[in-house]
Image (cartoon, rainbow, N blue to C red):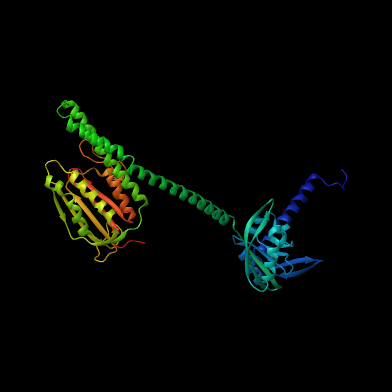
Amino acid sequence: MNNSIKSTEELLQELEETRRQLLEAEEIIEAIRTGQVDALVVQNGGKHQLYTLHTADHAYRVFIEKMNEGAVTLNRQGNILYANSQFAAMVCKPLSLIIGLPFREFIAPASRPYYLGLFEVSWSNDCKGEVALLCLDYTIPIQLSLNMLELADGVAMSIILTDLSFQKAAQQQLEDNNRQLEHLNKTLEASNHDLQQFASVASHDLQEPLRKIQLFSDLIKTSGKSNLSARELNYLDKIIASADRMKTLIVDVLNYSRLAGSEGGFSMVDLNRLVKDLLEDFELVIQEKQARIELSALAILEINRGQIRQMIQNLVSNALKFSRPGVPPVVTITGRRLALKKFDSAPQADGPFYMICVTDNGIGFEEKYIPTIFALFERLNAKEKYDGTGIGLAITKKIVEKHDGLIHVKSKVGQGSEFQIILPVKHLR
């Protein structure tokens, strides 16, 4: 074998040595970059020279290398003297190809004039601005924070780069959500308009033919009573009863729909007078069922009088309606000021909230039905046994919500129910 030709083993050894030196060089460079060394001894022509790294530069390198933001240091010409790993990741280039390049080359062409303006101003005043940073074939929205530094070798420009991609995406999502919300609001307005149209139809067009059914049914029953069989009279009574239930249902649905667009009408109302006036409407029912109404002193609240009257009317009506057979109904209406808008709140003489409690000794119901009892058309009892449309409590709940209040119910089968309503003492405008 020719001595000038190296063996495979020798070549492998040289390759391994080269790799070792390269690894050592990379470790040294990384140590310099991260501030792990303050001085280097370099052999030059048989002599050793000492190169020291200034403490200020050391601290600066350690700081920016640990940052989550990109960071670069520029000279007065705008060339990159130093860059951290995060900046290299932002521009998708290795650090070895970044150092020494003009920083403007990493700025998208459309943003360069703005960046150059910031660069000039920042030598006298710290400044910030948004630009587009180039990364391969796409750009990244970036906020630049420019500050002049005084280092051992003179002044330099420090630029911190904050990636705004997430912020921009969140802002775009917010704008999209706002547009969707605006569209939904318009759709809701249109639906409310349709609801008002329905209310108009329900108040006239639906009730008019119903009135004729009731009228002519009564006439047939009165004039033809002697000519009708017992079965026919029974059928006629069922028609009249169904018409009456239909009328009640239409009125209840109309009242519920009107609450959707009802605003304003708040004034200071004495609940004592309101409830006493209301109980006069139940005078005949109270006498018929030998009921007893117990009323404690109530407060003066800023409310919509008509709505709260209807709310209490619904609760008293239910208390009288769902009484136990053979047991005279006892309905208790009490109230107290509260410190907080909570059902377990401590009483407070001048508290900003007021709780009204309507308690009865009626048939009650299982508390598992509490989540659904305020739903539209929800009935817990057969309509053949107890009259009603299943809308009264839904209307009650809607009224409480219109007053920014809360409603809750406690009940036990065979022992009665207690409805608790919390309302603000003063209307929250």
Residue at the front extreme of this rendering: 223
Give coordinates of residue 385: x percent, y percent. Answer: 20, 37
Numbered circles on residues, count: 0
Residue nearest the viewer, comparing 279 with 240: 240
Question: With 348 as the anchor, is 404 left or right in this view?
Answer: right
Residue nearest the viewer, comparing 45 with 56: 56
Question: With 294 as the anchor, is 134 left or right in this view?
Answer: right
Give coordinates of residue 185: x percent, y percent. Answer: 46, 50
Give coordinates of residue 320: x percent, y percent. Answer: 18, 46
**In this rendering, is residue 100 above or below 318?**
below
Quadrant that contains the C terminus: bottom left
**In which quadrant of the rendered view does residue 107 lie?**
bottom right
Give coordinates of residue 417: x percent, y percent. Answer: 21, 48
Quadrant that contains the N terminus: top right
Question: With 211 as the anchor, is 38 left or right in this view?
Answer: right
Residue nearest the viewer, comparing 253 with 22: 253
**In which quadrant of the rendered view does residue 277 lie?**
bottom left
**In which quadrant of the rendered view does residue 345 lie?**
bottom left
Residue at horizontal 20 percent and vertical 57 percent from the top: 334
Residue at horizontal 19 percent and vertical 32 percent from the top: 221
